[in-house]
Structures are given as C-alpha cells and as structure tokens.
Image: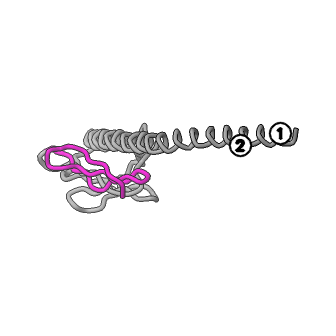
Amino acid sequence: MKEENAHRATIRVVEYSAIMVFFLLILIILVPSISKIVYNMAKQSSITSTKGTIDTVKSFYTDMNLLNEVGLPFKVEFNEDGYTFYELGKKVNYERSLNIKNLGKLPTDGSVQINVDGTVTVKNLTFGNFKCNQTNEQNLICDNK
C-alpha cells in the first residue's frame, strides 16, 4: 500500500513538473513578443504625439500672426516646466496669455521650429523614453534615449 502511494506521488510530481516546464516554455516564447509589442506601441505613441505637437505649434504661430506679425524662424522650446517662445532667435513673451493645448501629452524636452522657408524642424522632442527628431527628408525618427 505504501509503495502504491509512493508510486502515485511520484507520478503526480512528474505530471506537475511537466506542466510547469510547459508553462515556462510558453512564457519564454511569449515574453519577448509582448515586450516588442509594448515597445512598438510606445514608439508609435511618441510619433503621434510629435505630430500633434508640430500641428499645435503651427496653429499657435497662425493664431499669433492674426494678432500681429510674427517673424520667422519661430521656435518653441519645451522643458519639464513648460515651454518658451523664440522669434527671430530671440526669446519673446507675448502680451496675450496663451497656452499650448495639445490633444496628446506635451514633450518634456526638445524644440519645434518653423523655418523661413516654411519647413518644420524637430529636435530631441522627448516623450517618456523616446526622443524624436526630424531628418532632412521630413521623416520623423523616434528612438530610445
């Protein structure tokens, strides 16, 4: 009787061990895939937020031009405390209190500049762990810091 119980216990241990090995193999396969999905989602979110920030800066520039002539290049530098405006390379404070309202989140670092020729330059816009820049071909590139 004791031998039969010992035999059953041994079979149970082997069965439980096989189940654990099976689940560990599934985890080993799934964890890298899930990590890649999370990384790609965060990267796409940074690209979308960068595009939204560019559109917001363009809208702000247009709005300011309705009030008075705003010189180019027009630049907005972002930091953790907010943002600073530059016109013709000089820091400016607008009389009218305006806030940049963005549908996404604002960057914690970097700048967006509207150049004299109408192109936009993006330098080191930081969203979480990603910094976004714009190449000469106007393509956005977001990579880990």
Residue kind at label 1, given as amino acid type: Asn
Q: Secondary structure at mark 1?
A: helix
- Which residue is depicted at the point 28% across and 57% down? 86
Along the line of sight, the residue nearer the viewer: 86 or 112? 112
Q: Residue at x 45, y 42 (%)?
A: 38
Instruction: Provide the residue span drawn in magenta.
Output: 118-145
Query: Picture coordinates of residue 109 (x, y %)?
Result: 38, 57
**Res 37 → quadrant:** top left
Please name the residue shown 33% across and 42% down the image: 47
- Residue at the bottom extreme of this rendering: 90
Q: Is residue 99 above or below residue 89?
A: above
Answer with left or right where residue 116 lies relative to residue 15. Answer: left
Q: Secondary structure at mark 2?
A: helix
User: In the rendered image, is residue 84 in sight?
Assistant: no
Name the residue carrying label 1.
5
- Residue closest to the eye, 41 or 19: 19
What crowding class fits label 2: few (fewer than 14 Cα within 10 Å), some (14-19), or many (20 or more)? Answer: few
* Residue behind mark 2: 13
Q: Earlier in the sequence, mark 1 or mark 2?
A: 1
Q: Is residue 52 above or below residue 126?
A: above
- x, y (%) of residue 17? 65, 43
Residue 125 drawn in magenta: yes
Horizontal and vertical percent for residue 29? 47, 41
Q: Main secondary structure of the magenta part?
A: strand
> Considering depth in this image, is 45 or 107 the residue closer to the camera?
45
Q: Is residue 26 left or right of residue 106?
A: right
